[in-house]
Amino acid sequence: AQSVTQLDSHVSVSEGTPVLLRCNYSSSYSPSLFWYVQHPNKGLQLLLKYTSAATLVKGINGFEAEFKKSETSFHLTKPSAHMSDAAEYFCVVSRGYQKVTFGTGTKLQVIP
Amino acid sequence: ETGVTQTPRHLVMGMTNKKSLKCEQHLGHNAMYWYKQSAKKPLELMFVYNFKEQTENNSVPSRFSPECPNSSHLFLHLHTLQPEDSALYLCASSQEKDTQYFGPGTRLTVL
């Protein structure tokens, strides 16, 4: 069985300050982990993925995430928020193409 | 977004109508997916096709009928829908084991 928990449904940051979006997962196997972003009225765009290589994963638009097996976490960070980062972010755990579980999403608000 | 396209982008239909959603992927992938995204609910996987064969049907009501004529095209046929079926329907495709690429979605409203 596998599950994913996004700990915050909403996060609000000021422009230029760091972003932290938290994700914990549970999996009986070594999972693949992903972060996707969804802007209003758009589909989901892949930000980054972890597939058992380096534990620190760099993605697009300055985002990165660190896989911590001991904490079963895969938090998404960015050093400095930009207005264009305002969107909804989904953490995803996967074991093969059929066993994909999405988190409930975290809406990021960026305040000018 | 040009990798996976979906049409129409918006659809309004009555409960007695029959309509179809179309998805096309230009990425050479062999697996395609339909998801339902409702407000305040996690993304729900509806159907999975791998090499045109349906491999997953997550207890979706029969008023939703998928069709995959080839590995590049996926349809979702709709009939006698309910207002609670109003949602954003997302199509995705993948080639690697896990990474899915999404289309922009069809916003469906059932009156």
Image: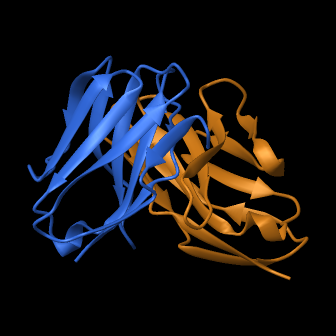
Chain colours: A orange, B blue
Asked whether the viewer can see residue B66, the reply is yes
Which residue lies most toward the bottom here?
Answer: A112
Residue drawn at x 20%, y 74% as measured from the top left? B83
Horizontal side of residue A85 vs B6, given as left or right: right
Residue drawn at x 54%, y 55% as measured from the top left? A90
Give coordinates of residue B3: x percent, y percent. 58, 34
Q: Which of these two is toward me, B97 or B71?
A: B71
Labels in figure, total: 0
Q: Which of these two is toward me, B34 or A82?
A: B34
Quarter the N terminus of chain B occupies = top right
In the displayed structure, B94 sits above or below A56; it is above
Asked whether the viewer can see residue A71, the reply is no
Quarter the C terminus of chain B occupies = bottom left
In the displayed structure, B10 sits above or below A29; it is below
In the displayed structure, B61 sits above or below A110; it is above
Give coordinates of residue B44: x percent, y percent. 32, 53
Q: Which of these two is toward me, A68 or A44?
A: A44
Give coordinates of residue A29: x percent, y percent. 41, 29
Give residue A67's quadrant in the image. top right
Residue drawn at x 54%, y 51% as measured from the top left? A91
Q: Which of these two is toward me, B4 or A85?
A: B4
Residue drawn at x 78%, y 50% as measured from the top left? A63
Horizontal side of residue B30 vs A85, given as left or right: left
Horizontal side of residue A103 vs A21, given as left or right: left
In the displayed structure, A29 sits above or below A3; it is above
Horizontal side of residue A90 vs B79, given as left or right: right
